[in-house]
């Protein structure tokens, strides 16, 4: 699972250096998702998604990609006074598209994208998700997202997790009954919901993807509704 790491804000050089070293971080104010790609200083790609409406229905988000050398990207951040809010404002001021980049410097390019807000996870956006009021007639992944985002009484436990090392898996009982990181699981369900499968039977509700399966104990308020 992808870890969910967050920070209150990005407003100085030290904070940006930390974020770029982590490569994947969510920011509370302004709400954004910052990711770094590339393996060396001359292959540096900084992707920033404006998460102000993340996990909302019928909304779109702006995503910006800065590609070039590390020094050029850092100079751009410095010009923006290391303020994430300013970075988003400056990027949004350019007429850029996925197939139409803007050259900010000789080796620094900016692309812009529109993203479906429903497919963008944000750990600070749970309150935007409508809670389930009754049990669905037929469960879908969006239903599971709503359940896990808003109902802390819904308990998730591992049924099994497999790796390439069967002996190690067996020694740890295939992870059975362990509780996965809730935010990391929720992130996967939001960002890659199509990859997951839902199973309903006499024993209850479970979800699976690849070599992992998790059981969900439904809260009493839904069962009684």
Image (tube, grey):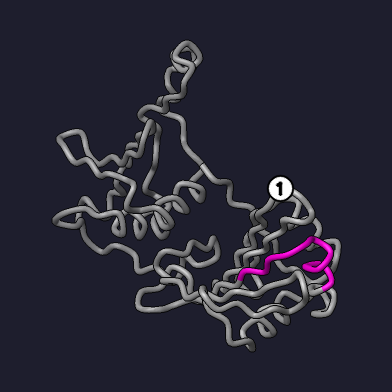
Q: Position of residue 22 (x, y in %)?
A: 71, 50
Residue nearest the observer in this picture, 202 or 92: 92
Above or below — where is 21 with respect to 9? above
- Looking at the image, which residue is at 67% across and 69% down? 66
Helix or strand or loop: what does disc 1 sit on? strand
197 horizontally vs 96: left or right: left
Q: Quadrant of the C terminus?
A: bottom left
The image quadrant that residue 132 belongs to is bottom left
- Looking at the image, which residue is at 41% across and 60% down? 150
The image quadrant that residue 136 belongs to is bottom left
181 in magenta:
no
130 horizontally vs 72: left or right: left
- The residue to which callout 1 is attached is 39
Q: How many marks?
A: 1
103 horizontally vs 216: left or right: right
How many residues crowd around disc 1 within 10 Å: few (fewer than 14), some, or many (20 or more)? few
66 in magenta:
yes
Which residues make up the magenta segment?
Answer: 65-75
Residue nearest the observer in this picture, 64 or 172: 64
The image quadrant that residue 210 belongs to is top left
- Looking at the image, which residue is at 79% across and 74% down? 76
Residue nearest the observer in this picture, 19 or 110: 110
Q: Position of residue 105 (x, y in %)?
A: 77, 77
Q: Position of residue 135 (x, y in %)?
A: 20, 56
Q: Position of residue 85 (x, y in %)?
A: 70, 79
**Residue positioned most to the front:** 106
Above or below — where is 56 with respect to 180? below
């Amino acid at each position: 699972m992808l870890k969910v790491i967050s920070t209150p804000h990005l407003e100085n050089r030290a904070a940006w250096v930390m974020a770029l070293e982590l490569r994947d971080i969510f920011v509370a104010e302004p709400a954004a998702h910052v990711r770094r790609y590339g393996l060396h200083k001359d292959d540096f790609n900084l992707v920033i998604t404006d998460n102000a409406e993340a996990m909302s229905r019928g909304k779109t988000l702006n995503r910006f990609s800065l590609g070039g050398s590390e020094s050029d990207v850092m100079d751009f951040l410095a010009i923006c006074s290391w303020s994430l809010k300013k970075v988003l404002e400056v990027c949004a001021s350019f007429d850029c598209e996925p197939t139409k980049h803007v050259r900010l410097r000789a080796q620094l390019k900016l692309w812009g994208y529109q993203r479906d807000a429903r497919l963008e996870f944000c750990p600070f956006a749970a309150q935007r998700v409508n809670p389930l009021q009754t049990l669905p007639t037929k469960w879908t992944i969006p239903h599971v997202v709503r359940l896990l985002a808003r109902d802390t009484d819904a308990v998730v436990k591992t049924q099994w997790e497999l790796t390439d090392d069967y002996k190690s898996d067996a020694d740890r009982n295939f992870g059975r009954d362990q509780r996965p990181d809730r935010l990391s699981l929720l992130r996967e369900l939001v960002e890659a919901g199509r990859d997951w499968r839902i199973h309903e039977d006499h024993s209850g509700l479970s979800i699976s993807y690849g070599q992992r399966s998790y059981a969900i104990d439904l809260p009493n308020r839904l069962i009684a509704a």
